[in-house]
Amino acid sequence: MNIKYDLHTHLIPMIDDGAQSVEESLMLIEELSNQGIENIVFTPHFYTHKESAEDFVLRRNEAYKEIRNLIPDYLNVKLGAEVYVTDYLFAEERDLRPLCIEGTNYMITEFSYDSDFSGGSMRRLLKLIGLGYIPIIPHVERYPALIKKKSKLDELIDMGVLIQSNFISFAEKGKSRKLLKLLNSGYIHILSTDVHNLSRNAPDSISKAMEIISKKCSFDIINSLNQNARDVFEGR
Ligand SMILES: [Fe+2]
């Protein structure tokens, strides 16, 4: 079964450390399509301590215009952001929906990788949830506090947080076994590429990962990955 959704990508040209030209952006989009992806969310980095949400959204929307009319019609695309969550995000009483996956309340969040999800990061997550947003924690494998402690993952999932992992990590020795266990136990809801370019989380990480996942996980688990991603993409 093909995964049809990629909810976490860095494909808008020249806005972050992802695609650095229109050509690179379009090539990566085509590669994702070749991997079976039909629905893509563009989630450039937004560093909340460096820029206001308003400035970021203007900058993102402007950069997106460079590729907007060049994306093949058969792909469904949406705008979003990977939001590095600091207290600055809440400094002004601002509507944060433009930072969510377009037309939804789902927000891809990012925290310091040494975060233990008990102090400030937990307070900020609860604040987002209180405001009506549904945080997605991407590349869970980068947070030792979450990977080592299932109880912490349980706590986050009970709060309504969704957990995402990068395809490439399933093809990496040292990460794969742990992530397969988490996926099979229902701790990972979404897989995405987090593609930046051909050498960092490249589109073919999907087929590399799925070759392993299809051997180690049931049809139901793989099916649920598509269903969860569809629910997020469609804002259900
Ligand atoms: Fe990312």
Image (cartoon, helix red, strand yellow):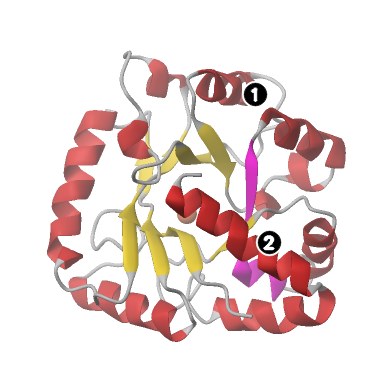
Quickly name the residue at label 1: 122
Q: Tag 2's secondary structure?
A: helix
Image coords of residue 23 (percent x, y): 21, 78
Range of the magenta residues?
A: 161-171
Residue at 35% in and 43% down: 103
- The magenta stretch spans residue 164: yes
Residues at circles 1 and 2 in contact by the CB criterion of under 8 Å: no
Q: Distance between the residues labelled 1 and 2?
A: 27 Å
Who is closer to the viewer here, 88 or 104?
A: 104
- Answer above or below: position of 115 versus 227: above
Q: Earlier in the sequence, mark 1 or mark 2?
A: 1
Residue at 41% in and 41% down: 104
Quickly name the residue at label 2: 224
Q: Disc 1 marks which amino acid? A: Met
Image coords of residue 224 (percent x, y): 68, 61
Residue at 52% in and 66% down: 193
Circle 2 packing at 10 Å, graded few (<14), some (14-19), many (20+), is: some
Q: In which quarter of the image is residue 99?
A: top left
